[in-house]
Amino acid sequence: MECNKTSKILAAEELTIAFGGLVATDHVSFEVAPGEILGLIGPNGAGKSTLLNLVSGIYQCDSGKVFLNGTDVTRLPAHTRARMGLGRTFQTPRFLQRSSIRDNLLLGTDLANQIGFFQSFWDKKGFDFEEEVQELMGYAGFSINWHSDINALPFGQRKRLEIVRSLLSHPKVLLVDEPAAGLNTKELEYVANLLQYATQKGIGVVLIEHQMDLVMNICHRIIVLNFGKLIAEGTPKEVSSNAAVIEAYLGRKKHAHN
Amino acid sequence: MKQKLLQPRTLLKLALWVVGLIVLLLLPGQLNNYQLTIVDSAIIYFIASLSYTVMLGMGGMMSMATVTFMGLGAFFTAQLAKNWGLPTPLAGLLAVLATAAIAYILSIMLVRLEGYYFVFGTIGLCNMMSTVFQNFKPLSNGADGINGIPKLNLFGFTFRNLSDWCLLLVVLAVILAIGVSRVRKSALGRSLMSIRDNPVTAQTLGVNVLRTKRIAFTIGAFLSATAGMLVAFHNGVVSASLFTFNVQQSLLMMVMLGGVNSTFGALGGAFLVQLMPEVLRPIQQYLRLVQGILLILLMIFMPMGIAGLLQSAWKKISKSIQKRKGGLNVGMQQNLENPGG
C-alpha cells in the first residue's frame, strides 16, 4: 500500500488566496503520492511558501480544497492537520531557543505518540527515542551532543535537525521549504539522504528549492509557479526544457535576442 | 544511559537536594515567631509564584491577575470553612477547585489575547476584581475582610503554631514545585515552550495553541488559589488589601528576582522580597525606591535572576567535575558519534 503511486496522500484543488489585491496563489492544483518527491519551483515571490502555508493550514484559503489521505482538511486548523500527519519545515529553522536539543526533538516524538498531557505527566513513554534519532542522524551526517545549546549549532546542522524533528513525528506528508539554502555541497547530500529516507518510509514530500541540482536529482515530478499561477508540471526533464519555465527564470527570450 | 545514576553530576545534584531538604525541615525549630512569619509568607508567595513559572516561564504568558485567583481561593476558603462550616481540608480543596473552574471559563476569552494584549486584559481583570473584593460583601465581607477563619485540621491534627505551619508549607511547596518541574518535562511543558518561542511552528508540530494556553492558565490559577487558601488558613484573616495590583507587582518582582525559567528560583526571590522591608526598616520610606533600582540593575546584569546565576555557576562546577572524572560522559558522546555502532 505504501508505494502505490495511484493513491494520493496529499491533493490540493484550485487553491486560491489573495492578500489585498495581490492574488498570491491562483487556482493551483497538485497531488503527491506516498513515497514521491514533488518539487515546487519558481522565481522569488512566485507564491511557493504561500502555497505551503495554505496546505499546512497556517493560512486559510479563499477558495479551493486540500485533501490529506482522502480527507477534506480545508477548514481544519494547522495543528489538527499536523496531527493527521502533515509535517513541515521552514526556510529558517525554527526551534525552541531556550530549550535543550532533547526537548526540541521530543516535540516531534510527542506528535508521533499523540499522548495526552496528563498521560505524559505520569509516564515516560516516548523518551526512549534515541535509537531512532541515531538512525536519522546517520542520514543527516552529524551527531548530536546532547549538552550543547541549540543556538550554538551551525546553520547547516540546524536545517538538517529540523528535518530530523519532522521525521520523528512520523508524518505522512512532509513539506520542506528550501532545505538547501545556505548549505554547502556536502551538506546538500545529507539533505538529499534525509529526503530519500522519507520516501523509503512512504512519506510524500513537497520540496521547495532553488538549488536546481538537488531538485533535478531527487524529485520525481516538478511543478512550477510564477506570479501565483501554475505554469508547468512534469518530470525534471520535461520541466527543464519547458519554454514557459525558461522564460520565467531567464526573462523573455525575444527581448534577450533583440 | 543505563549508568545515568552513577554520573558525578547526578550524584552531586542528589546530594544538594538532600542537604537542602534537611535544612528546610530543621529550619522551623531554630527560628523565633517573627522570623517564622517571614519564612512562612515567603513560602506561600513562592507557591503563588509557581503560577508564573508555568504561565510566564513556560508559556510566555505574563498574567497580571494571579493575585485575583489567589484572592478567590482565599475568600472561597474563608466562606466555606467559616460560614458554611465545612471541614477545613474539604473547604480548601473545594475553594481551589472552584477557582480553577472559574479561571478555565475566563481563559476561554483571555488566551485569545496575544502578547501585550493579554497583559492588559489581565490588568483589567486584576483591577476589576480587587474592587469586587473590596466592596462585594457576600464574598469578602467588604473592606473589613473576613476574620476568625477556623484553623486547618488535617487528619485530626490542628495547625496552630507557626513552626507546624512552616513544616506543612515546606512539604506542600516541595510537592507542588516537583509537580511543576514534571510539567516542564512533559508534553504539556514542551508544547507551552514551543508556543512561547514560536506559535506558528508550534501549530505545525500539532500543538493546539489555545487549548494549551487555557490549560496553562488553569494550572496557574490552581497554584495561585492554593496559595490563597494557605493565606486564609495561615493568617486566619483575609482582606481585600492582600489582592491588589500592588501585591501583583511584588509577586512579579519575586519571580523576576528568582528567575523566570527556574522552578525553584522564585523561592529565592520570594525570600528577598519578604526580607527587604525588614532589612530596610530604618529607611522604610525608600523601600519602593530601593526595590525599583534593584530590579532595574538586576534586569540589566542578570536577566535570568538568581537561578540563572546559580545555573551558570553549576555548569562551571559540573564541567570541571566532568573534566576530572571524564570517563563516563566521554564514553557516552563517543557512542553518539558512531550512529552505526
Image (spheres, coloured by chain):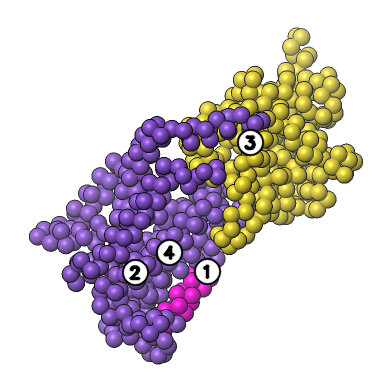
What is the quadrant of residue A23 in the picture? Answer: top right
Q: Find the magenta span and give its range.
A: B91-106
Q: Main secondary structure of the magenta part?
A: helix
Looking at the rendered image, the disc whose residue lies closer to the viewer, 1 or 2, is 2
Can residue A8 be seen here? yes
Can residue A59 be seen here? no
Distance CA(mark 4)–CA(mark 2): 10 Å
Quarter the N terminus of chain B occupies: top right
User: Vertically, is A12 above or below B76?
Assistant: above
Badge 1 and badge 4 in a common chain: yes
Q: What residue lies at 52% left-to-right and 37% top-to-bottom?
A: A146
Label 4 resides on the chain identified as B
Q: Secondary structure at mark 3?
A: helix
Q: What residue lies at 77% left-to-right and 22% top-to-bottom?
A: A217
Q: Which residue is mark 1?
A: B104
Tell which circle, 1 or 4, labels the residue nearer the N-terminal end: 1
Distance CA(mark 4)–CA(mark 3): 35 Å
Q: Secondary structure at mark 4?
A: helix
Label 2 resides on the chain identified as B
Mark carried by residue A134: 3
Looking at the rendered image, the disc whose residue lies closer to the viewer, 1 or 4, is 4
Badge 1 and badge 3 in a common chain: no
Tell me the shade of chain A. Answer: yellow
Amino acid type, mark 2: Leu
Q: Which residue is mark 2?
A: B169
Amino acid type, mark 3: Gln
Tell me the shade of chain B. Answer: purple
Badge 4 and badge 3 in a common chain: no
